[in-house]
Amino acid sequence: MTATYEPTTADEVYTSALEPPPRGLVGRVVCSALDLWCAMTGGLLELTSAADVVVRRRSDSAEELRVAGGPPTVSLALLEQVRIDLIELGPDQFRSEWGID
């Protein structure tokens, strides 16, 4: 009789990282131009530094979840919460909590 390996935490099934939001060429140019304008008027460079939190399957790197994180401070906090949940929750519970079908 052989035993089938069952992962006990979602961290064994998924990986998480910050990735740039998907934008086409026009979107990148517009965001860069707006950031330049903001910098010239005393604002912050927030559009081009925005990042999404992305959860991928370890087995094939397929994207399972993408959450718009926004500015770096918000993205980092969201990424930290996702990583805590990956460690503390089982795979099925993680999928349920984050609304992954």
Image: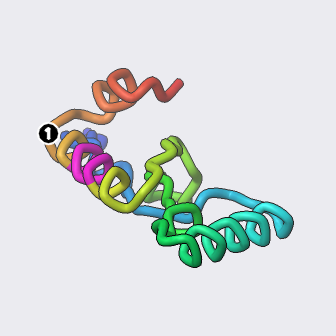
Count of numbered badges drawn on the protein: 1
Query: Type of residue at label 1?
Result: Glu
Which residue is under mark 1? 88
Q: Residues within 10 Å of mark 1 (few under 14, many from 20)?
A: some
Snapshot quadrant of residue 9: top left
The overriding secondary structure of the stretch rendered in magenta is helix
Residue at (58, 53) in percent of width and height: 62
| Left or right placement of residue 87 versus residue 45 in this view | left
Q: Is residue 80 above or below residue 19?
A: above
Q: In the image, residue 10 lies at what x, y percent?
A: 28, 43
**Identity of the residue furthest to the left in this view:** 88
| Left or right placement of residue 24 versus residue 19 in this view | right
Q: Is residue 95 above or below residue 70?
A: above
Residue at (44, 52) in percent of width and height: 53
Residue at (50, 63) in percent of width and height: 46
Q: Provide the residue span drawn in magenta.
A: 77-83
| Quadrant assignment for the N terminus | top left
Q: In the image, residue 72 lies at what x, y percent?
A: 37, 62
User: Is residue 2 at all visible to an observer of this figure?
Assistant: no
Reply yes or no: does residue 79 show up in magenta. yes
Residue at (37, 21) in percent of width and height: 96
